[in-house]
Image: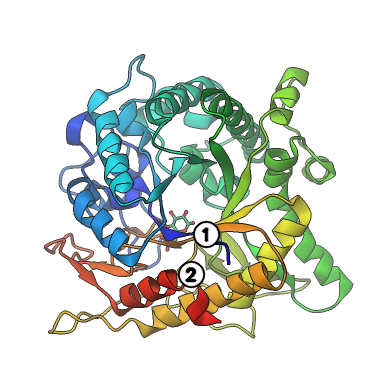
Amino acid sequence: MKENFLWGGATAANQFEGGYMEDGKGLSIADVTLASIHGQSRVIHDDVHLECLYPSHEASDFYHHYKEDIKLMSEMGFKCYRMSIAWTRIFPNGDEDTPNELGLHFYDCVFDELAKYNIEPIVTLFHYEMPLHLVKKYGAWKNRKLIDLSMRYAHTVFERYKHKVRFWITFNEINSLLMEDGSWHSSGVVFNKGDDVKQLQLQIAHYQLLTSAKIVKLGHKINKNFKIGCMILYPLTYGATCKPDDQLLAMQKLNQTYYFLDVQVRGYYSNICEAYWENIGRKPNFTESELLELKNGTVDFISFSYYFSEIEGQGQLERIKGNISIGGKNPYLAVTKWGWQIDPLGLRISLNQLYDRYQVPLFVVENGLGAEDIVLENEKIHDNYRIEYLKEHIKALLDAIEHDKVDVIGYTVWGCIDLVSDSTGEMRKRYGLIYVDKDDNGNGTLKRIKKDSFYWYKELIASNGGMLR
Ligand code: BG6
């Protein structure tokens, strides 16, 4: 195991920071989204209704706890911390000419605090938090104006933090765009009756891919030491049986993810993209000069989230959901309380598939178990189920690195400190190694409590993974 392997944890601003109106911040789409009740889709408002409880408004209140939280990360031995910048702190409406200094200042404080403990920030620019104003005024990513507005934001933060941040990620789970609920989530797009949804999705994907490429080019110009990566949700898919037809379907499912990676890593719309266009009878509009921009903005690494795997095959398969992706149920795998299939070996397979295909460094920036925790009277939280999940996945990661020789630069546990769930808005679904005292009704002291997994992960990092060998 390399000495400089980046062990750490990950969060996203809208799920973790709170302070939704603090210091001039504007509203993002997360700020008007309610938690889901009994598994229904999350209700979205067009403005804040004062009588409602929006999970993002306070979330885990990192905004006021960042010093304490970063100290705890350091106590665990974190080498890195993946976080996102809220676009709406920097440009509250998204289309101002000048940025909000107080918003910029907040992240200066966070990066300085991380530097104090030698924790490397890994910063995602767009993690599911489109400024609400851009949705209302421009239709969000339906409008190519978003390319310029996002570039302005990226340029501002690159210039501001060029000596504080080295690792950047452009769009979180960019491939979720082509998935069921993905368009609102990742791009703030609402489809209207009569819209050619498939055509629009391809066009939005093109705008985001182009923006990502422009950002990579810009970033490297501002600081040649920047490492800028893409980020996908990797929905590892097996054939439901060894029947070749099932294998073909599984392959085609994954191709939808390679659609994005081929462009971001190889720099062009590949045969997979062309086949997809032909298959759905649509194609995005682009110019020759845009194709050149895609070519000149390829990423330095691939980062991805891995939580589950799924199957595809002919005939009736029972369908299950793992965050945004929907796939077939695998009879060999157990599921979490939220129905996500648990497949540690799948992480090793995913790492091999991705490395084999792209030959660029990989970064596992999200992995973890969403579960309910019980706090005992003595304030102990025995989350051995989480330790078990992480242990098996990290063993698989180590196997990929040590036995399969896959180049992996880091691993960050998702929601290292409890945060709001993205798919449901619940607090009850916890990923953390550190508990945050808050419930789904917004009650709680926000006190941080170390779970058993805190001590386990600390030991794991101290041994650089060695304790699992
Ligand atoms: C990923 C997202 O899809 O999954 C995160 O990037 C999200 O934002 C994570 O929190 C886990 O999903 P959930 O719905 O359990 O919070």
Camera-side residue of 367 and 168: 168
Residue at x-position 77% and y-position 37%: 269
Residue at x-position 49% and y-position 65%: 367
Among the two numbered marks 2 and 1 on one chain, the one whose residue lies closer to the N terminus: 1
Residue at x-position 52% and y-position 81%: 468
Instruction: Give the quarter of the image for residue 239.
Output: bottom right
Left or right of 393? Residue 337 is left
- Residue tagged by mark 2? 464
Indicate the secondary structure of the residue bearing disc 1. Answer: loop
Where's the C terminus, which quadrant? Answer: bottom right
Q: Quadrant of ligand 1?
A: bottom left
Give the Cα separation between the discs numbered 2 and 1.
8 Å
Residue at x-position 42% and y-position 38%: 165
Name the outermost residue toward the front: 3
Q: Position of residue 197 (x, y in %)?
A: 62, 39
Q: Which mark is residue 256?
A: none
CB contact under 8 Å: marks 2 and 1: yes
Disc 1 packing (10 Å; few <14; some 14–19; many ≥20): some
In the image, residue 403 sits, relative to residue 34, either above or below, namely below
Name the outermost residue toward the top: 97
